Image: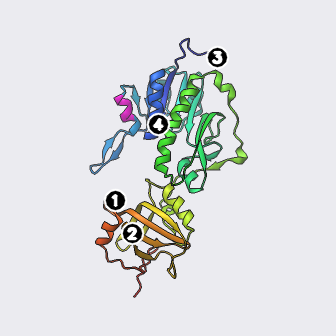
């Protein structure tokens, strides 16, 4: 196979969240983006009006052809896609299943930008899972897609350090730029770069399932290092939480302090820190919460939250129902 004489490729780009935007911007400068496919608009905001997903909004700004079929399984949807005569489909967090007939459609196949160093963290939440597990490095993998979940051969990777204090939000932003760099190189190198593809070692695979609400609950009896990783892994979304006197309290910003609080039960409120932090004992340390979000309200400083609460030192927080000493 040989590409066009000028090196430009005819691309159909498939994605949905903000993570995919830098790659689309980069590829649209160098190649012919025949269409952008996203998930359909979703109800959002107080009025629950339908809103375009982030990538669709950006594609409109770039004046790129935009489509959002409910599925790619129908004959009509596949015929419409085939008519675009793409050299390659580029897929970044699209969120819809690509049938085998679609995977076989482009001249050079379908290339997926996945936010981990495959086969580690296949699946939906690789960024969060890497931080929660205490990984010190991660990266982006460009994979030639096949029917399995992130199982295709890896064409190229770029890696990076997971720095101390890294949150899923900050790592998301760094990896989205790394993804743009990686896909720019891979698409420019088609078709020759496909010869570099390496099959994944399935026995080494680790999966990254979606985050559940239950696993975002703080366990005050867990080691402080584990709690710190949990908070950073689920920040800013979906956010870790614990139960307060008037419902769930979501943690926005916190830092761990190692060293057992003297004679304090895990989950005990220890009072305010020097800068107004809400200090809570854990089994082997103290968690200083500087910003939080009470149920039904906006995020606020911990000091402001406590000004409106009758929470005295010694109060024990959940996630189970609160216990207040008599």
- Residue 194 bears which disc, if any? none
Mark 2 or 1, closer to the camera: 2
* Mark positioned earlier in the residue sequence (3 or 1): 3
* Mark positioned earlier in the residue sequence (4 or 3): 3
Task: Determine which residue is flagged by label 3.
Answer: 1
On the image, the x and y values in percent for residue 19 come to 46, 40
Say how the picture is coloured: rainbow
Task: Determine which residue is flagged by label 1.
Answer: 299
Q: Are marks 4 and 1 in contact (CB under 8 Å)?
A: no
Task: Determine which residue is flagged by label 2.
Answer: 274
Which corner quadrant holds the N terminus? top right
**Count of all numbered marks drawn on residues in the image:** 4
Q: Residue furthest front?
A: 274
Q: Is residue 35 left or right of residue 131?
A: left
Task: Determine which residue is flagged by label 4.
Answer: 20
Does the rendering let one see residue 33? no
């Amino acid at each position: 196979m040989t590409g066009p004489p000028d090196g430009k490729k005819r691309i159909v780009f498939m994605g949905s969240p903000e993570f995919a935007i830098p790659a689309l911007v980069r590829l649209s400068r160098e190649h012919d983006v025949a269409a952008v496919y996203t998930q359909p608009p979703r109800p959002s905001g107080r009025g629950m009006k339908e809103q375009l997903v982030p990538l669709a909004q950006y594609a409109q700004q770039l004046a790129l052809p935009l489509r959002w079929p409910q599925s790619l399984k129908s004959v009509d949807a596949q015929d419409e896609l085939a008519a675009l005569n793409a050299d390659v489909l580029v897929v970044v967090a699209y969120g819809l299943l690509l049938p085998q007939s679609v995977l076989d459609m482009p001249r050079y196949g379908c290339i997926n930008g996945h936010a981990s160093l495959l086969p580690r963290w296949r699946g939906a939440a690789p960024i969060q899972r890497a931080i929660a597990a205490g990984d010190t490095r991660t990266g982006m993998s460009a994979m030639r897609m096949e029917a399995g979940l992130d199982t295709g051969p890896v064409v190229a990777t770029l890696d990076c350090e997971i720095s101390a204090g890294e949150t899923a939000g900050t790592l998301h932003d760094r990896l989205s730029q790394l993804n743009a760099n990686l896909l720019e190189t891979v698409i420019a190198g088609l078709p020759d770069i496909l010869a570099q593809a390496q099959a994944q070692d399935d026995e080494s695979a680790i999966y990254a399932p979606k985050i559940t609400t239950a696993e975002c609950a703080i366990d005050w009896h867990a080691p402080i290092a584990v709690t710190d990783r949990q908070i950073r892994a689920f920040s800013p979304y979906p956010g870790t939480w614990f139960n307060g006197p008037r419902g769930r309290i979501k943690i926005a910003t916190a830092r761990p302090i190692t060293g057992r609080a003297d004679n304090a039960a895990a989950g005990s409120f220890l009072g305010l820190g020097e800068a107004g932090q809400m200090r809570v004992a854990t089994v082997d340390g103290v968690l200083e919460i500087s910003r939080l979000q009470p149920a039904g309200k906006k995020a606020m400083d911990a000091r402001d939250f406590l000004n409106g609460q009758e929470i005295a030192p010694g109060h024990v927080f959940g996630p189970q129902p609160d216990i207040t000493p008599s």
